[in-house]
Amino acid sequence: MNASRDLLEPTSLAEESVVISSVLVETKAASLKDVTTYLAQMPGVQVHSTHGTCLVVTIEAPTIDASYAIATELTAIDGVLNVQLVYANFEDDPGIKARMRADAKN
Amino acid sequence: MKFSRRKFVKSTAVALATAVATGAAATTSSLSGCAPKPTSESTGTSSSDSIKTYSAVCRYCGVGCGVLVGVKDGTVVEVTGDPDNQTNKGANCIKGMNLVKLLYGEDRLTKPLIRDDKTSKGTKNGLREATWEEALDLVAEKLKATWKTDKSRLAFWGSGQQPIIEGYALVKFWKAGLLSNNIDPNARLCMASAVVALMNTFQTDEPANCYADIDSADVFVTWGANMAEAHPVLYSRLVARMQDNSSVKHYDLGTITTKTSKSANKVLIFKPGTDLAIANYIANYLVSNNLYDADFVKDHLQFKAGQENLSDALEDGYDASDIGQKVNDVHGITFDEYAAMLAPYTLEYVAQLSGVEASDLEELAKLFADPKLRILSLWTMGVNQHNRGTWMNHNIYNIHLLSGKHAMPGCGAFSLTGQPTACGTAREVGTFSHRLPADLVVNNAQHRRYSEAVWDLPEGYLDGIEKPGPHTVKIFRDMSSGKYDFFWSAYNNWAVSMPNLTRFLGKGDKKGLLDTFVVVNEVYPTLSCDYADVVFPVSLWVEREGQFGNAERRTAIFEKAIDPPGDAMWDLWVFVQIAKRVLAGEKISDDDAFTKLFGLIWDNAKDDFIGEQREVCKTLWEEYRTFSNPDLNNRANSINKDAEEKFGTRADDGTYTPSKLKMEAKQLAPYDEYLLNHGLSWPCREVNGRWLGTSWRFNNGGSQEDGYDQLGVQMYGKAGLAGNISFYKSATSKPSVVFRPYEPPAFEPNEEYPFWFVTGRLLEQWHTGSMTRRIPELNDALPEALLYMNPNDAAALNLSEGDMAKVSSAYGSVDIKVSVTSRVQPPAGRVFAAFFAEETLINLVCEDVYCPLSKEPDYKKTIVKIEKR
């Protein structure tokens, strides 16, 4: 297992509204290094560890929409075979926040 | 989000993903932010940060992945792959990110709606808000009037998305309350061919294998299956298996190249319909070269041939025609006769017929001949939605049975489903026009007696439903011809999904639909609502407690996590309210009919359910599971064993052979066990006080604890047979290899209609888009229906990416945008478009032909012409 960054290193999005997800990125064996490098430069994306050809990755983005867009982008990277969602917290998504306020009133 | 909160959430995200990646998922339930296993008492468990977590099952596709739903202040704020659900072990596809948005679309239906002016049908106008009392009274009045006048003129159309308990209550209302078989599910459109072939072959429905077989197979064969889009989590396991072991091979067989083809070592693109011949070639190769599994054949198999030259089910009168009445006829043959029938399917003939390279066909056949290889065949709609769908299912079983490759770890013939509970509800509960719960059928006296025992009905009461009712296609054809007065649908969107929509939405026959009183249970306004006289707004997904059963026989419960919006109600409440009104004053013997059927869950004095949803579900489940636990009911138990010698056969010497139903073959566990275990695959067995599931039906190769069918084989089977298998559910314990020949599609391209048109589904849009189109991220990714064309075909018609084309068949025509991108790559002469966009309504073009045995439509072989607009 190779930790590429501090597990909890804050990103530039700290203190802002943020939807946090974790995904597993399955790569072709020959593409593992290139994919890891590519992911490292993607805004809001952080690679935490590598297990065989599987990368543990978090996505931080302002909304569910933006998170899904990034996850979709991951699937299209050359050498990526599959992206699987493990966890998503969207309590900061503006639409969900509005819903929570409305539900709280009710 | 505060920094400390963000750190906590992120650490949870990383820990959970790491646990899944390392296979330590089973321990993650103790991590912060993730729910411990719920129990029957603990609905919604609290994590340390005030988020309550509920156990659930994904609402999208047919895989049935477990998810944990986190709720804060009454709103879903978190989704986690459920590490304790063995279907997916903590991983979901990325669509799971959008599960929450299913619930919160802006146009959720929150009030009952009534249409006063029938002339507004077929438009977006004309529905007004109403109270529940007004809407329920109106629907009950119409249903009761039709029922009392001519009950052949009413129908219910259900779904493979209908939770198990809701389907069970509905079947009880329809079959025992109304004594009507005019009920069928949309599973008729996707799984019926699989069901008929399973029943014909094994005398029991549903696959013998499990999803975990993907993790140990040596060879994958996908037949007409785009798993990458339709079953993404399973496909990811397939890919992972291939990554783990470079010797693992994947052969993708289909009529078009799809995303699933990307992982394949070989892609075998065949001429539509010739898959029948390809499978027969493989069988011929095994038999003629003496490379079949002789021990398996000797111990397990019997051989049959059936009625051939079925022509095609094009006309309304097909089922009643001479040939239509013979389609299920089979007769026993010898192995040598079977071999002789296969003989014409030579390599040369099949290569020429199918268009597949002979070397590729032979390579595939040789794999089946290798006794060491574990081969897993996986298939979906390309096989089922086929003018010979039942036959093609047979032919896949034939080659797996001949090669002794079935019901074993990593090895078997595995039919996948397209909806989250097509197995659990449509098939296991039996919401079909010919079925009763647990594989029982209406036209079998012993089966009716058993159902009467469970439902505490007088003996003979269900003889009123002895004759099977109309199948889905017949219901819609007849409705378009004015033969229905009352039609109720729930959990589906027939105005988009039925084939040949032109017949009832576009041409003169539309009058029949407009004249029928149409009721729709819905969560969002769909095209079907445009034709409704009444729309009932209902709960969606975790807005109530429900149960799904997936393709690996796994039943899982989703807990109620939030309330439905506005006045939307639980479907079960709606069914009971209508049953109460329609059955008012009716008797079963001397008992009040409604109380007899629903008194176990309904308090007439309080006019409400007895207990909360958990209690209601549990009460109905305990009655339902009596169908597969006969020892819970003495009368049922006696019928199960044929103890009174009423249903078996007596030889000339007086020896009696009882007709044993073997209902325990589908044994279900107590309700709480599904909560504790996050799902269990049936048959479930109690061993030393623990309820255990079964991964491999009929397989006696290990203990029940390890997932083998040890206790089932002990109860009804025989040990020591080839492969440690005992197909005990068959009357003779011998599955049937039925010879099914190649017969061509109903139509083949000609000068006027030179293209084959295939319709199906793509990742983003599911279930006719009724939910997925409310999710901007999914809809933006696939905002409109596209006609995927071969670039050379497009160029020949002067069509480029984004051009509009008119696609026409003998049935109808639509305008649609052309795409020549690589997402779907049809070979020359074939085109593909997904069905989900009501503004395009591609099924106006789709042919109206069904498999003569299963009555499942063929959505894959319409011949069309294409013109530039």
Image (tube, grey):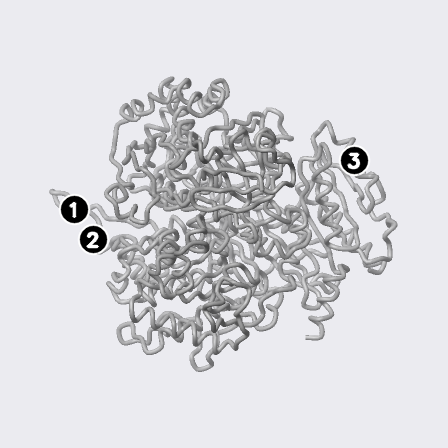
Front residue of B850 and A100: B850
Report whether mark 2 lies on the same chain as mark 3: no
- Foreground residue, B802 or A94? B802
At a point 38% along the width and 59% down the height, the residue shown is B626
Residue B641, given in percent of the width and then of the height, sits at 28, 52
Q: Residue at the location (69% across, 70% down)?
A: A103
Residue A31 x, y percent position in the rendering: 74, 30
Q: Are marks 1 and 2 on the same chain?
A: yes
- Residue B815 location (% of width, % of height): 56, 46
Q: Spot the residue most to the bottom.
A: B605
For the residues labelled 2 and 3, the Cα–Cα distance comes to 70 Å
> How far is the residue under mark 3 from the one under mark 1?
72 Å
Q: Secondary structure at mark 1?
A: strand
Q: Is disc 3 in contact with disc 1, using a CB cutoff of under 8 Å?
A: no
Q: Amino acid at mark 1?
A: Arg
The residue beneath circle 3 is A36
Q: To which residue does mark 2 refer? A: B645
Q: On screen, B700 above or below B350?
A: below
For marks 1 and 2, the one nearer the N-term is: 2
Q: Residue furthest front?
A: B869
Could you tell me if the residues under marks 2 and 3 are in contact, i.e. CB atoms within 8 Å?
Answer: no
The amino acid sitting under disc 2 is Glu
Q: Nearer the viewer, mark 3 or mark 1?
A: 3
Categorize mark 2 by other alpha carbons within 10 Å: few (<14), some (14-19), many (20+).
Answer: some
Chain under label 3?
A: A
Identify the chain of the residue marked 1, using the numbered disc in the image: B
